[in-house]
Image (spheres, helix red, strand yellow):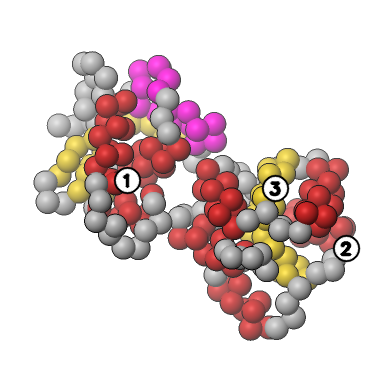
Amino acid sequence: MKLLLLEDDPDTRTRIGRMLRADGHVVDECASGPDAIFLGTSNEYAVLILDRMVPAVDGLNVLKTLRAAGVHTPALMLTALDDIDQRVEGLAAGADDYLGKPFAGTELLARVAALSRRSPIADAVTHLRIADLEIDLLKRIVKRGGDRIDIQPQEFKLLEFLMRHAGQIVTRTMLLENVWSFHFDPGTNLIESHMSRLRAKLDRGGDKDLIHTVRGAGYRLDCDD
């Protein structure tokens, strides 16, 4: 399985990573909250292992951000905190399990195995298709008419959201919250510029337009004019 590990202490991170790899897992390690958010929103993982007490953006806020971005991967929170209120706060933020430090390696592996059985990856849709446009959500590949299209990570997230809501009008607010995790309007042409670049890549030459502007409402992706 592919796992994400957030742990700021280098010795602890190395020890846990080595233990998980010895158990047959692929592990992406990071030491900061922003790195964990970037990896968690850019890749598919079976389980997230997050240290609660990371400086600046801690594991709890990482989890809140990922959940707000639509990442529902099971999460194991590592913590030295014994306060029951802290554990309740973590569970309310979307954590699936807690493991207190210090812990036995066998218990960590057992908890990861248990959480992996809840992972949405096994049951998740891995391909989306409309007309001649298709995306592979695991390999992060976009094709139209069988030809591969190179798009940037944020463009991929935008396209995925549009395709998951194909035929529906998606508003500016919906895009800001679900694609960029903004709960406010930055007052820029952020959406318009990304949409313009995405359209240019999808609607090449005589290809039929798929992304339509609904004046005064938002955008809609479908194969109808």
Instruction: Answer whether residue 83 is magenta in the image.
Output: no
For label 1, the crowd category at 10 Å Cα-Cα, with few meaning under 14, some 14 to 19 and many 20 or more, is: some
Looking at marks 1 and 2 on the same chain, the residue that comes earlier in the sequence is marked by 2
Task: Determine whether the residue tagged by mark 2 lies in a helix, strand or loop.
Answer: loop
Q: Which residue is mark 3?
A: 29
> Real-space Cα distance between discs 1 and 2?
44 Å
Mark 2: amino acid: Ala
Residue 132 lies left or right of residue 215; in this view the side is right
**Disc 2 target residue:** 104
- Which part of the image, by quadrant, shows the C terminus? top left
Please give the label number shown on residue 137: none
Q: CA distance from mark 3 to mark 1?
A: 33 Å
Q: Position of residue 23 (x, y in %)?
A: 83, 45
**What amino acid is labelled 3 in the image?**
Glu
Question: How far is disc 2 from disc 3 in space, using C-alphas?
Answer: 20 Å
Q: Please rate how many residues cluster around mark 3, counting C-alpha atoms within 10 Å: few if below 14, some from 14 to 19, many from 20.
A: many
> Which residue is at the front of the view, 89 or 186?
186
Magenta range:
133-149
SS under mark 1: loop
- Which mark is in front, 3 or 1? 3
Determine the image quadrant of residue 151: top left
The residue at 50%/33% (across/down) is 140
| Residue 66 visible to the viewer | yes
- The tag earlier along the polypeptide, 2 or 3, is 3
At 39% across and 52% down in the image, what residue appears? 180
Q: Is residue 5 left or right of residue 37?
A: right
Q: Residue at x 63, y 83 (%)?
A: 85
